[in-house]
Structure formats: structure tokens, C-alpha cells
Amino acid sequence: MEITALTEQEIQQFRTETKGTTVKTHFNNAGSALPPDVVVDTVINYLNEEAICGGYETEYKYKDQLDNTYALIARLTNANKDEIAIVENASAAWLMAFNGIGFKKGDVVITSEMEYVTNIIGLLDAKKTYGIEIKVIPNDDHGNFSLVALENAISPQTKLIAITHIPSTAGGVMPIVEIGKIACKHNILYLVDACQSAGQLPVDVKEIECDMLAVTGRKYLRAPRGTGFLYVRKEVQDKLKPVFMDGFNVQWISENDFKIRNDGRRFELYEKNRALTLGLGKAVEYALNIGVDRIWQRVQQLANTMRRQLESIDGITVHDICDQKCGIVTFSVDAKDSASVKSMLAEKQINVSVGLAKSTLFYMNKNHLTSVVRASVHYYNTEDEIKKLCDALSIYNKIKPL
Ligand SMILES: Cc1ncc(COP(=O)(O)O)c(C=O)c1O
């Protein structure tokens, strides 16, 4: 189906609805995007009501809206509402799923060289604790994930395939649908880190055929910091032991026994920030109202423009890999370290971030990178902002160190 491009008028509207766009040129959406004003107002208003009416009383009043956040997330991901747990961030979501699996010595987990630090630490910890084996699939010569290498790596001992949809520092998208087909064919558990992808491009758990999916709120979903969610397929929920239990996700049925809740909220505890839950719901609703496929189209177009313009500047190297690129653009400036580039841009009210080797150590080491500058676009960015970034970099690059 043809996707209707976002119009200039719509983009102006989104900017008017985002106060941060009047102050900064924000190219740190992969760190934390600017939230729409309605998201911020929702959180502040809820906190004010809590302060005046009481926390439990306010929760009761907003019961349906709070519950609706689960339904909105389910719509966003094509899941069912009872397959969602709301947690604080993607790391908590990922670790909750991973550590619930229950490994034994000799189990094999397959991952890619693009995997994020939290996930690899989780794997290394399971290696030390249970004696699992970790197989890292190297990218092929073109920088793409190798489906052939994945097939070859699978054995009867393979317990889990854990893949990051959009790595934090490489500008590319991993073929998670194709990986899902392989995981499904071999009946292997499949855990996807969609931290950078949810809100940037359509993420459909049925299409991906994943068992578990971890997401953060603050990045491409434009939700408040400290929000995230975990999807666990209904049929898999009983196979995962909740890492934490309290009187909310577990029913104390007798003095000597308990029963774990029968839905996705078995991966949550009772106490959480209700204001942020509501803010997360608003952010998801905002994205759904625009249409994530339309967001994705705009993000790709802006990122490609940025890449082209950066590549045309002498002394700048764009590092992005994979045939399918995303909104994250990584580059370096000859003879300038990434932190200085970031500081120079910050003085001009342009936000970028520094991608450090430790975020994706396998990939960065293999490519001899210690850090990269990361400029990540969202749909509310403009071509004028890209020009501003490139102009600043062109001038900066002409200034030779003494
Ligand atoms: C690909 C990827 N996965 C996971 C995370 C961790 O997300 P969080 O900080 O929400 O735990 C990040 C954070 O940057 C990330 O880029």
C-alpha cells in the first residue's frame, strides 16, 4: 500500500507541538527524542493530581487510561494487551526476559556482532553462572547480517537467538523478520531488542515471529525517560520465570504456596510510576496517530540526505553499514575526536551524541573505531537543520589544530 508522505504543514504542526524544537536542533533522538508537549503535560498534570488527591486515589480515577497504555502498545506492536509488561527501560525488559529463561550448562545462545552492551553482559553473566556458550554471528563482507552463517551456527543445543533490530552505533537495520523465520523453523526462542526501532519503523511481533521484544520509551517513541516495555508471546509466558515477584504479579494462595499471574504483567512489580505510564501511552498514541510507516519514510529520507551531505564534506567519514539504513547516522571528523565535535555543535545549540566503543564492542573493535559521532534524525527534524549541522561541521573542519 502506498504510504502518504508527511506534508510540510504536518511537520510544522509537530514542531509547534514540541517546545524543544524552538530551542535546539535535536539530532540525539537515538539517545532520547524530544517529547511532544502533550506527553509532558500528561505527566505533570498526573503528578499534580497525585500531590493533591493522593497516589492511590489518582490511580483509581485514571484506571482506564492507565490500562489503555497496554492496549496502545499492543496496537503499536500488533500484540495482545495481555502480552505486554510496562517496565523502566529496554535493559530491564531484555534482562527480565533473558534471565527468566533458565539456562543449563551447554545451552547455546546465538547473537550478532551488533549487539548492545547490556545484552552481551547478560550473556557473559549467563556463561559464567550456567556455562552457556555464546556464538556471535559476524557480519558478512558488505556489513550485513549473515543469514547463512546463522543457519550454519544452529545446533540442537541452541536455546535462544538474541538480536538487536537497530544497533546503537552503526546506522543499519538487521533483518529481524528473516531471522525470525529461521528461529521459527528450528523452534528456537527468539528475543529481539527493539530499543532503537520502536517508533522509528513498524515493529510487528507477528511478522517478526519473536517470542520476546524489549523496548524503551524515550528514544524513537518520544516518551518520557524511565519508560519501556516488554512483549512476551502468550504461549511462551509460562516458560519464563519472573525475575522479581511481589503481591501483584504473584498470588499468595496459601501459607505455603503462590501462583504466578496469568498475563504479561507477571513481568512487572506493583509499584511503578503511574504518571510515566500515562505519558508512555500518550507518546504511543501520538505516534499511532501519525502512522509509524509515515514516520519511517520521513526518517529514512532525512537520514539519507544527512549522509549525502556529510559525505560531501572534506575530512568527514560516514561509518554506517548494512544495505538497509535507518535514522541513525554515524561519522567521524579527521583529526578531531568525537567528544570535541559534540561540544563544538552543542555551542551552536545542535545536539548530537558520541557512540562509544563499549556500546557495541564487537563491531567497534572489528572496525577499529574507538568512538563515532552519532547524529540521529526524527520526523520532526528538517532539511534546514541538516544544513545547519553540515555548515557547522564544514567550518569546524577547516580549522586546523595549531
Ligand atoms: C540497541 C539498544 N539496546 C538497548 C539499549 C538500552 O536501553 P535502555 O537505556 O532503555 O535500557 C540501548 C540504549 O541506548 C540501545 O541502543
Image: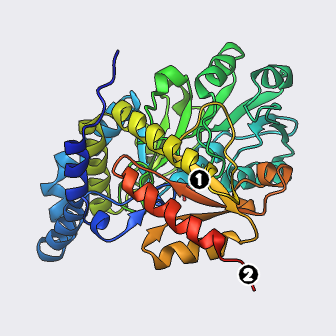
Q: Residue at x 64, y 69 (%)?
A: 397
**Where is the C terminus found, in terms of image quarters?**
bottom right
Residue type at the position of mark 2:
Pro
Residue at numbered disc 2: 401
User: Circle 2 sits in a helix, a strand or a loop, which is it?
Assistant: loop
Which label number is shown at residue 141? Answer: none
Task: Say few, some or many: other residues with alpha carbon within 10 Å of mark 2 (under 14 / 14 to 19 / 20 or more).
Answer: few
Spatial separation of the CA atoms under disc 1 and disc 2: 21 Å
Which residue is at the front of the view, 312 or 288?
A: 312
* 160 in relation to 316, above or below: above
User: Circle 1 sits in a helix, a strand or a loop, which is it?
Assistant: helix
- Residue 338 pos. (x, y %): 67, 69
Compared across the picture, whether 79 is left or right of 18 comes to right
- Residue 288 pos. (x, y %): 28, 37
Do the numbered discs 1 and 2 sit on residues whose CB atoms are within 8 Å? no
Compared across the picture, whether 115 is left or right of 193 comes to right
Compared across the picture, whether 217 is left or right of 393 comes to left
Residue type at the position of mark 1:
Leu
